[in-house]
Amino acid sequence: MSFQIPENFVQQYGNNFRLLYQQKVSRLRPWCQLEAGIVGQSKSVERMGKTEAYDITSRHADTKFVETPHSRRWIDLADSGWADLVDKLDKIRLLADPVNGYAKMAMNALNRKIDDTIIAAARGNARNNAGLAVLPTTQKIAVGGTSLTLAKLLATKEILDTNEVDDDASMDTDGQSASEQAARVMVVNSKMLTNLYGTTEIKSVDYNSVKALSQGSIDTFLGFKFVRSERLYRDVSATTRFGLAWSRSCIALGIGQEISTSVDRRPDKNNAWQVFADMSIGAARIEDEGVVEVACLE
């Protein structure tokens, strides 16, 4: 018998590519007011402020006029792209064609970029006719040495309720709007959720809704739709990450061009195949009163 037969052992290689775990779709887009078909660099969102009624105390009195406040916020478009090459001669050396996988990777990357744009708009500066509007400190919950807690969730709800920000219940009863346009969303990451489940209050048997939330059987609590995102902003000290809550109508996502992909041969690159994708989007915080930033200890 031969002891040299191992020299002829072969290895089998895969004939397709596995895309490694990553966020593939935009999780926050469904929770924004969509402004599609924007033509131009920017689009305005026209706003009218609150007014109060007056008393009529005598017959035939002169009409009093209220002064309705008007203002404007701007959605500024920004372009994003993704591109990679597959050399023509490399394709003959591969069992699997990577082009299709590259196209999927491009879509995934741009979908994550949409969420980054929404997060930046929610907590960043909003452009108006007078300049830039920062998110007021009254709309921010301090870290307080803790991660996400029941107290912070209740404080967030109180801020939105005090500001009369629409929620599902109010939109159902006012007879003027559809409830799906007013859903409140709470954007948190996995660590915040883990810390929330570990708090003493949440461990109480009284909080059955949170138990169901932790088990994945429901995704709402205190009127908030919970959406997990691992892309929330972290401060420079890397000790605080910022959760966000808002009402759907308070964040606008503007679309100049949806994600577009193409696969083309590049004569200037020795006929390599180019996988290309791009989009043009922007986002803006329409109402400061409808957005709350929740600082959480990492």
Image: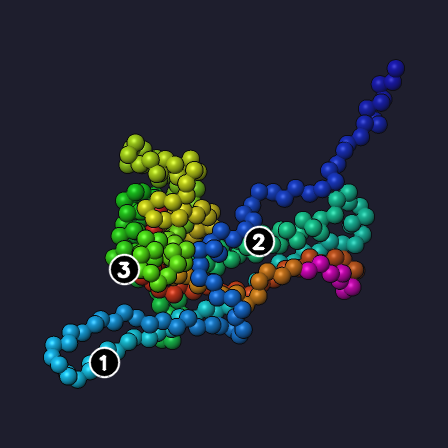
Extreme residue toward the front, this view: 59
**234 or 122, which lies in front?**
122
**235 or 295, which lies in front?**
295
Q: Which residue position holds label 1?
A: 65
Q: Which residue position holds label 2?
A: 109
Q: Residues within 10 Å of mark 1 (few under 14, many from 20)?
A: few
Q: x, y percentage for residue 6?
A: 81, 24
Q: Which residues are magenta?
A: 262-268
User: Of circles 2 and 3, which is in front?
Assistant: 3
Q: x, y percentage for residue 201?
A: 28, 36
Amino acid type shown at disc 3: Asn
On the picture, is 38 further left or further right than 85?
left
Main SS, magenta residues: strand
Q: Residue at x 27, y 60 (%)?
A: 163
User: Of circles 3 and 1, which is in front?
Assistant: 1
Q: Which residue position holds label 3?
A: 163
Amino acid type shown at disc 2: Ala
Mark 1, secondary structure of its residue: loop
**241 or 292, which lies in front?**
292
Can residue 248 be seen from the camera position used here?
Answer: no
Mark 2, secondary structure of its residue: helix
The label number, if any, that marks residue 257 in the structure image: none
